[in-house]
């Protein structure tokens, strides 16, 4: 079956001296599952789950090759022999499932973000050229420091080989140290490591030569951005020339291409591209690399479905596809695809919330749709219920659907009732916002999961105590969600005030000048503002924070802020709602308490959050029927918390 549906993706790939069983790759990605520079049990379990799901190649996250490479407090380190034991544990967990395991060799150069104690260490780079995104001014490396770092790469690769890894990869992508040497815009050296293309390549070429001598016949690869997509970034042209030269010199056994740089906001959006980017968008340039090198080419860039990956390989745009978030969201993706059941795959939607979002916040990565990710030690296996129960789930939003699916998986007889005509809850509303349409797939995935688990669903069914009593369940899971919250405000005259849900439903259609009150600085305020601006209205967006989108993962926020700029939406930061009258919105500066007036307004839209719909929950708790609350009915938050609580309750009921 696998050969019929995904003949290219399922076929083995030879890289140097090894053969990878299929062409699905999990690339190196920070997980925050590292303690004191070493892999934790959590990381081992996380990677084993991907290997067990059938991925062909796992590249373990970046490992610092010298002390000066410690760019965050939770980076893996490979700068002494003590790292070998941790890599051996990873190899023992991953390789028995048939997956190959590579390590990543890393030095960030000037991209230093933090240290163990919060102070900023000295950043080292080819030249003293500042980093825009992290606002770091580095010191230029001396020649002896360059050599020390090169020796660090070699020693780290030797340690990984000793631990039994199948290969190593130098990270020259995303504006990190090797890329800083290659880039004439930031490498201003006039010694043997700068000044000419050949000199700028010297750091990388020498390092690879030294590694070749040490590792032969081990596999060595390079990851590089095909265009850092930043005015001061490494160009696509130079990256291609570098790959061609390294391939000709037989210094690499494969190349792994991506896009973007960590050095600027716009460039960094390509490190983990969110849902605004087309699936597999890097394939247009990877195709050219295929013509320049005679080693396999791997490609990244929001490839979230095996069908997309198969098309890329079929067109010969690449030889293997990096599907990291797709595997974070569904580690079973390869098995399901190759079993001929791709429809069962839980597709990643590129929301960036719990994967890279958690990393940026300093927490272990997970997935809003699959909270088992990162929690494999606790939720890696479904434990069958000791006794089959009749479970009633009230509410068909994300929390209710997940709780129902998990409880049914464990053997319970589960009925889910939903008052509306459609399952999905607030996810359906979110999917109606501009730049957020793909989010609706979260509802599709959860509905599918519940159906596959054998949950009986009834829509247009409002649950009350009479219904509960008539069904006499052994347990009730309440996931009744929330409704829009209207804050207290002073109103005068006959102002037109509606909430965000009404605006999404089209109730602001006739108004020309609209103020959106964006309390939470998340998707809702920005989304509604964009929606209304697209209808031709003049829109002002006021938030009590520093900027709209402040609560969002940076790569998502960047895209939305760019849209606000393009649509000429006026932004008023640091302002809370005070009141409204016929045609004026009265705001108050949150720091000075001075008034800020917006005049000539025809409609005010409240994106001021939600309040729990918890009446049934309270009644049931008082009735003595075993009852569990999940998601917004406990306190309004996001899909992530609703699905996680659905998992926790479904696994314990
Ligand atoms: S959190 Fe969102 S982007 Fe990240 S893996 Fe899950 S669905 Fe994909």
Image: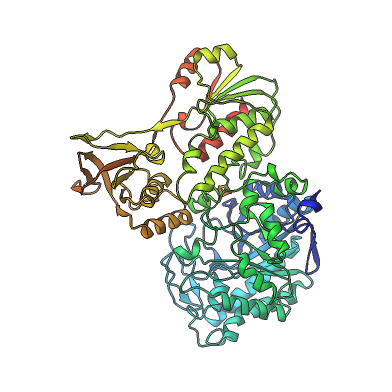
Provide residue 309's location: percent of width, then percent of height: 68, 57
Q: Nearer the viewer, residue 258 or 338?
A: 338
For residue 615, what is the image quadrant?
A: top left
For residue 22, what is the image quadrant?
A: bottom right
Provide residue 164's location: percent of width, then percent of height: 76, 60
Residue at horizontal 56 percent and vertical 52 percent from the top: 32
For residue 132, what is the image quadrant?
A: bottom left
Q: Identify the colour scheme used.
A: rainbow
Q: Is residue 309 visible?
A: yes
The quadrant in which the C terminus is found is top right
Q: Nearer the viewer, residue 627 or 394?
A: 394
In the visual, does 542 lie left or right of 402? Answer: left
In the visual, does 552 lie left or right of 514? Answer: right
Provide residue 274's location: percent of width, then percent of height: 52, 55
Q: Is residue 648 visible?
A: no
Residue at horizontal 75 percent and vertical 71 percent from the top: 215
Above or below for 381 versus 616: below
In the visual, does 179 lie left or right of 231? Answer: right
Q: Nearer the viewer, residue 81 or 542?
A: 542
Residue at horizontal 46 percent and vertical 75 percent from the top: 139
Provide residue 152's location: percent of width, then percent of height: 63, 71
In the rendered image, the residue lying farthest to the front is 510
């Amino acid at each position: 079956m696998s050969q019929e549906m995904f003949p290219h993706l399922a076929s083995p790939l030879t890289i140097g001296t090894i053969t990878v069983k299929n062409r699905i790759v999990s690339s190196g990605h920070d997980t925050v599952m590292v303690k004191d520079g070493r892999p934790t049990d959590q990381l081992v379990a996380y990677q084993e789950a991907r290997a067990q799901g059938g991925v062909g190649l796992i590249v373990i996250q970046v490992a610092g090759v010298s002390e000066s490479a410690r760019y965050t407090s939770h980076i893996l380190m490979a700068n002494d022999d003590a790292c070998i034991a941790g890599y051996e544990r990873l190899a023992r967990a991953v390789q028995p499932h048939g997956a190959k395991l590579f390590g990543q060799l890393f030095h960030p150069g000037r991209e230093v973000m933090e240290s163990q104690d919060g102070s900023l260490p000295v950043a080292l780079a080819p030249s003293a050229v500042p980093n825009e995104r992290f606002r770091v001014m580095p010191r230029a490396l001396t020649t002896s420091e360059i050599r020390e770092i090169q020796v660090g790469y070699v020693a780290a690769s030797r340690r990984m080989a000793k631990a039994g890894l199948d290969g190593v990869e130098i990270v020259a992508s995303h504006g990190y140290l090797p890329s800083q040497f290659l880039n004439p815009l930031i490498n201003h050296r006039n010694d043997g490591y700068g000044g000419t293309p050949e000199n700028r390549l010297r750091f990388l070429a020498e390092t690879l030569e030294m590694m070749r001598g040490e590792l032969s016949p081990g596999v060595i690869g390079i990851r590089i951005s095909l265009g850092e997509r930043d005015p001061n970034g490494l160009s696509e042209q130079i990256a291609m020339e570098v790959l061609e030269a390294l391939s000709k010199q037989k210094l690499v056994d494969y190349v792994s291409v991506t896009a973007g740089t960590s050095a600027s906001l716009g460039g960094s959006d390509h490190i983990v591209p969110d849902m605004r980017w087309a699936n597999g968008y890097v394939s247009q340039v990877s195709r050219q690399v295929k013509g320049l090198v005679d080693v396999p080419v791997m490609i990244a860039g929001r490839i979230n479905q095996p069908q997309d990956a198969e098309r890329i390989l079929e067109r010969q745009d690449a030889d293997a596809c990096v599907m990291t978030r797709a595997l974070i969201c569904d580690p079973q993706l390869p098995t399901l695809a190759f079993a001929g059941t791709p429809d069962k795959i839980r597709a990643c939607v590129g929301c960036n919330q719990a994967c890279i979002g958690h990393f940026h916040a300093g927490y272990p990565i997970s997935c809003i749709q699959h909270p088992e990710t990162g929690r494999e030690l606790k939720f890696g296996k479904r434990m069958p219920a000791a006794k089959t129960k009749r479970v009633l789930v009230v509410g068909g939003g994300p929390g209710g659907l997940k709780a129902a699916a998990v409880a049914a998986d464990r053997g319970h007889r589960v009925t889910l009732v939903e008052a509306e005509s459609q399952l999905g809850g607030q996810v359906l509303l979110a999917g109606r916002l501009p730049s957020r349409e793909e989010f609706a797939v979260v509802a599709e995935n959860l509905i599918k999961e519940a159906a596959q688990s054998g949950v009986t669903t009834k829509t247009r069914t409002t649950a009350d105590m009479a219904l509960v009593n008539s069904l006499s369940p052994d347990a009730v899971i309440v996931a009744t969600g929330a409704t829009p919250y209207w804050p207290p405000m002073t109103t005068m005259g006959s102002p037109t005030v509606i909430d965000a849900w009404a605006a999404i439903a089209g109730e602001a259609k006739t108004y020309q000048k609209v103020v959106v009150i964006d309390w939470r600085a998340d998707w809702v305020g920005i989304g509604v503002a964009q929606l209304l601006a697209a209808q031709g209205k003049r829109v002002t967006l006021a938030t009590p924070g520093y900027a709209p989108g402040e609560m969002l993962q940076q790569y998502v926020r960047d895209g939305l802020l760019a849209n606000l700029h393009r649509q000429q939406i006026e932004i008023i930061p640091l302002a809370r709602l005070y009141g409204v009258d016929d045609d004026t919105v009265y705001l108050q500066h949150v720091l000075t308490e001075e008034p800020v007036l917006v005049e000539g307004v025809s409609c005010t839209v409240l994106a001021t959050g939600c309040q729990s719909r918890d009446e049934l929950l309270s009644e049931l708790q008082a009735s003595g029927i075993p009852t569990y609350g999940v998601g917004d009915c406990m306190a309004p938050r996001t899909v992530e918390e609703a699905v996680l609580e659905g998992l926790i309750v479904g696994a314990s009921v």
